[in-house]
Image: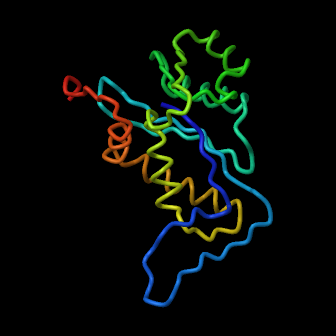
Amino acid sequence: MADEVGFMMTPNVKKTWAPIAQTPVVAYRNRRQQKVSVLGAVVLHAATAKIDLVCDFHPDSYVRGEQAAAFLHRVLVEYPEKTIDVVWDNLSAHKSPIVKELAAEYPRLRLHYLPTYAPQLNAVEGVWSLTKYHRMANHTIGELEKLHAEAKRHLDDVGGNQALLRSCFEGAELALNLSSAQ
């Protein structure tokens, strides 16, 4: 399951606790809409029941066909000699000519597309929610490099936690029949 997310310089403001009559203020500077785009995939190893998180970071950039193809190529290199089924949404970058060429060049790479407006079916959306809307909520980061480092730190933390990654599959209501692999 693959997708992309943008970590913005503008914080995601979320309710929080504060002493009575001391309303919390999230102070930030917003010179322009800088962000860190991330292409990521939750990779399930059916034979071992292990789940990996693979991410490519693109500071101050958008995800286009070239980035999507480079990400898929990275996945092909990291998981050699295995059939790779990539499930993602219908973003135009995912269906770009360069992505189609890559899929044609590597028959073990099979692309599948989710129905329109169905992010709840993508397990990696749970990873984005954990990092962007929970762990990084109310941030006051004012520099792109620091935003990149903080996003990477949180994604590495989530990616290293099998229980959290498994919960992302369960949250997407995906059946994980891993009893035979354990």
Q: Nearer the viewer, residue 96 or 120?
A: 120
The part of the image, by quadrant, that contains residue 82 is: top left
Point 60% across, 26% down: residue: 72
Q: Is residue 16 above or below residue 153?
A: below
Taking the view exactly as shown, the residue that stands out farthest to the bottom is: 21
Residue 64 placed where, x, y %?
73, 33
x and y percentages locating residue 110 in the rendered image: 52, 15
The residue under the point 53% across, 84% down is 23
The quarter of the rendered structure image containing the C terminus is: top left
Look at 67% across and 63% down and name the residue there: 10
Q: Position of residue 24 (x, y in %)?
A: 54, 81
Q: Between residues 156 and 22, which one lies in front from this camera angle?
A: 22
Left or right of residue 156, residue 146 in this image = right
Looking at the image, the residue that sits furthest to the right is 31
Tell me if residue 170 comes above or below residue 108 in the rendering. Answer: below
Residue 100 rendering spot, x and y as whole percentages: 67, 15
- Relative to 60, is 113 on the left or the right? left
Tell me which corner region of the image, top left, top right, bottom left or bottom right, holds residue 180: top left
Say if 9 sits above or below 162 in the image.
below
Q: Residue at x 73, y 42 (%)?
A: 62
Q: How many marks?
A: 0
Q: How is the image coloured?
A: rainbow
Q: Is residue 137 left or right of residue 144?
A: left
Residue 151 image-quadrant placement = bottom right
